[in-house]
Amino acid sequence: MNNKQRPIGVFDSGVGGLTNVRALMERLPMENIVYFGDTARVPYGVKSRSTIESFTAQIVDFLLQNDVKALVIACNTIAAVAGQKVRTMAGNMPVLDVITAGAEAALNTTQTNYIGVIATSTTVNSNAYARAIHSCNADTRVQSQAAPLLVPLVEEGWLDHEVTRLTVREYLKPLLAEDIDTLVLGCTHYPLLKPLIRREAPGIALVDSAITTAEATARALAEADLLNTDNPAPDYRFYVSDIPLRFRTIGERFLGRSMEQIEMVSLG
Ligand code: DGL
């Protein structure tokens, strides 16, 4: 297998990262993809940095053994607290992550220089989005809000449910009280709530980091001369650490298509 044919490794704490796989399949339809979701140990969004770092190291080891040519950190929480660890393990290999791509997209979108972020508690506490945004533009104001209840609501499929609407409204209240004009959906699950969030935050631009990360991946692969341009029937492999009840249903909701090869592997 030549370098271009090697798969892109995408990983997440669970099923949510399939939103990134979906965006990659659309943006880079010739690429082979290996996905790992740590479904046995999800959620990461409430766990400590050291636990997330050690789980992440196991996932990256697994993907490197699968001969990936690039790594995409689809999980905001992993990117927030273990991004550096992943880059150290990956050496020269391109590593893309949802926070870097989301921060860049938010900066390109805002007119008022005031950006809101919703994410898991661990991501918000790490301040990773604000740091990524400020490293490009120190004058931008960033206000973050943890929105942990949205993860189980999305997994329940309550994408247009009254309970979800009220929860979103409550979380957005402090952000909408300010002059933000851009809202980063800083968690794998939130892009599925885009229509509902759009109604609750009219006039505010939403940044979906799955799409911007796929764009950044395309750029990085082109720069490294690793783009696969001759692969009309790409191979998609999905690995998880547990196959819980309703996994396929939930996974296919995130992916927007059926999942053929799902395999279970235990790490650690
Ligand atoms: N994938 C996580 C994220 O994007 C959400 C789920 C979790 O808490 O593990 O932050």
Image (tube, grey):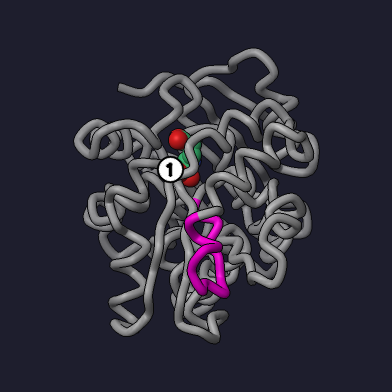
Q: Residue furthest top?
A: 245
Q: Nearer the viewer, residue 217 or 32?
A: 217
Q: Nearer the viewer, residue 256 or 49?
A: 49
The residue positioned 64% from the left and 58% from the top of the image is 24
Circle 1 SS class: loop
Q: Residues within 10 Å of mark 1 (few under 14, many from 20)?
A: many
Name the quarter where the C terminus is drawn: top left
The magenta region covers: 174-186
Residue on which the image places disc 1: 120
Q: Quadrant of residue 111?
A: bottom right
Q: Is residue 91 left or right of residue 45?
A: left
Q: Is residue 213 above or below residue 160?
A: below
Q: Residue furthest front?
A: 177
| Residue 113 falls inside the magenta stretch | no
Q: Quadrant of residue 93?
A: bottom left
Question: Can you give x and y, in whole percent of width and height, for residue 9 in the image?
Answer: 49, 48
Q: Nearer the viewer, residue 74 or 115?
A: 115
Question: Can you give x and y, in whole percent of width and height, for residue 22 in the image?
Answer: 68, 51
Q: Nearer the viewer, residue 229 or 107?
A: 107
The residue positioned 66% from the left and 39% from the top of the image is 166
Amino acid of disc 1: Thr
| Residue 184 falls inside the magenta stretch | yes
The residue positioned 41% from the left and 57% from the top of the image is 144
The residue positioned 58% from the left and 29% from the top of the image is 152
Q: Is residue 263 above or below residue 158?
A: above
Q: Is residue 63 left or right of residue 184?
A: left
Task: Examine the rendering and report whether any part of residue 9 can be seen.
Answer: no
Q: Quadrant of residue 17?
A: top right
**Ligand 1 lies under 8 Å from the Cβ of mark 1:** yes
The total of numbered circles placed on residues is: 1
